[in-house]
Amino acid sequence: QVQLVESGGGLVQPGGSLRLSCTASGSIAEINYMAWYRQAPGKQRELVAGIPTDLSTNYADSVKGRFTISRDNAKNTVYLQMNSLKPEDTAVYYCNVFARVRYNPAFRTYWGQGTQVTVSS
């Protein structure tokens, strides 16, 4: 199995910054895609940013130019640097990885427990 531990959420004023981290552990054989999703109250979960193994990136239109996703493969960690935060960025942020474990050729999706980000004055 793969466990994901997120950190870095919290309360920040509009215009501020936060950096989220998510580290994967367990019997990991290979991690393919890594991503961050978010879910605001009363809304569906949405993709914020993703980064595959070739380190290309994709972002939701609402965060382009403000958020940066990166990954450290040696540490099995994905980061989300969030700048110029807005109240509408308030949500629970979830780490998501597409990985396979040792002795199993099948990839599957794993989710973190979520970390709250609140942008408010």
Image: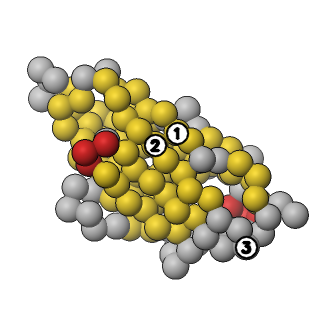
Q: Position of residue 2 (x, y in %)?
A: 34, 27
Image side of residue 99 versus residue 111, left or right: left
Q: Which residue is mark 1?
A: 6
Q: What residue do we see at 25% from left, 23% from top? A: 27
User: Image quadrant for the C terminus?
Assistant: bottom right
Tag 1 secondary structure? strand
Work out whether residue 48 can be spotted.
no
Going by the numbered disc 2, the residue's amino acid type is Cys
Disc 3 element? loop
State if disc 1 and disc 2 touch (CB < 8 Å). yes
Mark 3: amino acid: Gly
- Where's residue 7, x and y in %? 56, 41
Disc marking residue 22: 2
Pointer 2 local density, CA inside 10 Å: few below 14, some 14–19, many at least 20: many
| Residue topped by disc 3 | 15
The residue located at (55%, 32%) in the rendering is 113
Q: Earlier in the sequence, mark 3 or mark 2?
A: 3
